[in-house]
Image: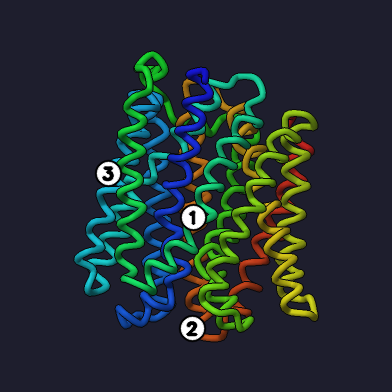
């Protein structure tokens, strides 16, 4: 195996674990709510702050990877986010639970801009294809997270579900340490971050990411609860449904990466965003509720994850090389940071009305993202 492929394999594993730390919460949301005597709105607020930290940290993680080198920053992110999960052993109240979530989010936040920066600079040709493999490898691992977390959380204790994936993250950091130092290039020069916002159409790309984040963050947190409460699914089946979304996400990312390299990232972005909107509306409007759920699981899984290789490749294409890490940091801040607000609002709507109302609210953001994707297709080449 070449060094480049070896790096991509390890980053795929790291990608899986980075998301798995946050995928533990949704299938155990009801159980944690009862155990800590907390409302959905309260847990949604904690999730919102966590995702906001996750997004803000990306603003620092991206430039840090430009300065120190990507492999070093990935190792740091994996090791410290994994270690933060041990705080959950002490989580007997909301304060300790929130502290664990916030620290885990802080250290995890360095990962995404760093890994995408590494891939863009390592795989100069067929960048979207490499992004698709990275995303698909991550999704393969994530597929099993909700089910494993649910089983551990219900059979033993929800705290051990977090700790399991924390230990695996630390192990992945140790494996990253075996990568040769020659791959860890750094650009130790002064960077003028304001130059990033002078890049043509960068704000259009950022707006799209903010809108898609406002939809996806709420869906990620509340979909298992939606299936359980609004559609009558068992807790275990709701957890498995999340895993099935990730399975179709693997297909979406592999196909999306190849298609973006062949047909252009902006066209693929619009096509997959249309799929996101269609699946959201069918979930809420299809008269046969269970069929609507199945269509959503397939459509959203393929479309949401499928748009990611095109978007990350496009951001790399339009960004100057010395600001690429900062560009990915800004992109993920708006996806995870600003997008995190939807978790809090959806939690409020779920408590005040119902989860159906919350999902209608989030679907509006998907529609707005589709409109922006058409503007990107007209103005951004590639």
Residue 202 located left or right of residue 142: right
Q: Disc 2 vs disc 1: which is toward the camera?
A: 2
Q: Quadrant of residue 365?
A: bottom right
Residue at image position (56%, 86%) is 353
Placement of the C terminus among the 4 image quadrants: top right
Q: Residue furthest bottom?
A: 353
Label at residue 80: 3
**Residue 338, label in figure:** 1
The residue shown at (29%, 41%) is 79
Secondary structure under the numbered disc 1 in the rendered image: helix
Counting from the top left corner in percent of width and height, residue 123 is at: 58, 21
- Disc number lying in front (2 or 3): 3
Q: Secondary structure at mark 3?
A: helix
Q: Is residue 207 left or right of 66 when viewed as pictured?
A: right
Regarding residue 326, the answer to whether it shows in the image is: no
The crowd level at tag 2 (other Cα within 10 Å; few <14, some 14-19, many 20+) is: some
State the SS at label 2: helix
Q: Nearer the viewer, mark 1 or mark 3?
A: 3
* Residue 266, placed above or below residue 47: above
Instruction: Identify the residue at image location x=68%, y=46%.
Output: 251
Query: Which residue is identified by label 2?
Result: 351
Between marks 1 and 3, how big is the CA–CA gap?
A: 24 Å
């Amino acid at each position: 195996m070449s060094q480049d492929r070896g790096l991509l394999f390890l980053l795929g594993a790291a990608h899986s674990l980075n998301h798995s730390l946050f995928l533990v919460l949704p299938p155990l949301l009801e159980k944690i709510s009862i155990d800590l005597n907390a409302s959905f709105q309260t847990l949604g607020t904690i999730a919102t702050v966590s995702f906001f930290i996750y997004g803000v940290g990306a603003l620092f993680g991206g430039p840090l990877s430009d300065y120190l080198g990507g492999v070093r920053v990935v190792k740091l992110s994996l090791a410290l986010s994994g270690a933060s999960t041990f705080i959950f052993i002490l989580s007997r109240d909301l304060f300790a639970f929130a502290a664990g979530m916030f620290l885990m989010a802080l250290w995890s936040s360095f990962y995404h801009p760093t890994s995408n920066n590494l891939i863009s600079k390592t795989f100069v040709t067929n960048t979207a294809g490499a992004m698709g493999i990275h995303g698909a490898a991550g999704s393969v691992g994530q597929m099993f997270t909700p089910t494993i977390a649910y089983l551990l959380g219900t059979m033993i204790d929800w705290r051990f579900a977090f700790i399991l994936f924390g230990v695996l993250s630390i192990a992945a950091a140790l494996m990253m340490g075996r990568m040769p130092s020659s791959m860890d290039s750094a650009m130790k020069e002064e960077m003028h971050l304001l130059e990033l916002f002078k890049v043509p159409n960068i704000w259009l790309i950022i707006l799209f990411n903010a809108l898609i984040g406002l939809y996806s963050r709420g869906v990620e947190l509340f979909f298992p609860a939606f299936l359980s409460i609004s559609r009558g699914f068992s807790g275990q089946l709701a957890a498995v449904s999340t895993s099935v979304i990730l399975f179709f996400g693997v297909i979406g990312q592999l196909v999306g990466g190849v298609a973006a390299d062949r047909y252009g990232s902006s066209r693929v972005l619009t096509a997959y965003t249309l799929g996101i909107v269609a699946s959201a509306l069918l979930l809420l409007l299809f008269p046969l509720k269970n069929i609507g759920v199945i269509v959503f699981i397939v459509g959203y899984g393929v479309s949401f994850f499928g748009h990611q290789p095109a978007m990350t490749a496009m951001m790399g294409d339009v960004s100057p090389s010395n600001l690429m890490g900062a560009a990915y940091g800004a992109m993920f801040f708006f996806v995870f940071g600003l997008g995190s607000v939807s978790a809090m609002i959806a939690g409020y709507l779920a408590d005040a009305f119902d989860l159906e109302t919350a999902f209608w609210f989030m679907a509006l953001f998907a529609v707005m993202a589709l409109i922006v994707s058409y503007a990107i297709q007209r103005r951004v080449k590639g």
